[in-house]
Image (spheres, helix red, strand yellow):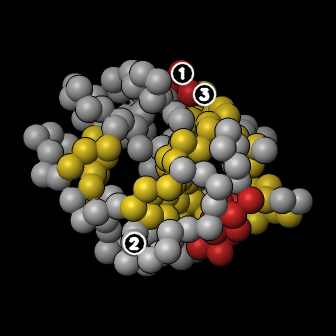
Amino acid sequence: MIFRARPDGHIDLNGRRVRCALGKAGVIPADAKREGDNRSPVGVWTIRQVLYRPDVYPDGPTTALAIKPMAPDDGWCDAPDDPAYNQSVKLPHRVSAERMWRDDAVYDLVGVLAHNDDPPVPGLGSAIFLHLARDGYPGTEGCVALARKDLEALLAIAKPGDAIEISVD
């Protein structure tokens, strides 16, 4: 199944449209995506795995996708010159890495999308996730963000091989 995220701020979820947030600077063709541009890459991105905070989801999220609990020292490398670029790392990391265990709950539940990961190309964008939206659905740094109930519903019906499509219309 492909869940289509549209630039108008909606995603198709099992026959209904729900709100989502995309990059605060809009969407961009994947080959033009650059680290830090605040744009969501257009394309179809398989949901590789689901990361979750075990203090929030003690039994893990309900999903058929691969799941992995996060730890407080988990990070995601966003430094294009580092060999671990666009990969999970342990903090502190020798160069820039985003903290996954956050106080704002945005990453309580994260779908890792298959953007620029096989293999990662330095500078073409890292940490493009499916995650929880902030109140009011402000733009993301390039991710797709949904309300908790909607992300939980999407993951509950997702199967291995399912994907998020970030579309231009």
The mark lying in front, picked from 3 and 2, is: 2
**Rendered position, 30 above or below 53:** above
Is label 1 in contact with label 3 (beta carbons under 8 Å)?
yes
x and y percent of residue 122 in the render? 33, 23
x and y percent of residue 98 in the render? 28, 51
- Secondary structure beneath dot 3 equals strand
Q: Residue at x 45, y 29 (%)?
A: 117
- Secondary structure beneath dot 1 equals helix
Task: Report the residue marked by disc 1.
Answer: 31
x and y percent of residue 126 in the render? 40, 38
Indicate which disc residue 50 carries: none
**Which comes sooner in the sequence, label 1 or label 2?**
1
Estimate the spatial distance between the alpha carbons at disc 3 and disc 2, rounded to whole Å.
35 Å
Q: Amino acid at mark 2?
A: Pro
Among all residues in the image, which is located at the extreme right?
15
x and y percent of residue 153 in the render? 70, 68
Is label 3 in contact with label 2 (beta carbons under 8 Å)?
no
Task: Report the residue marked by disc 2.
Answer: 54
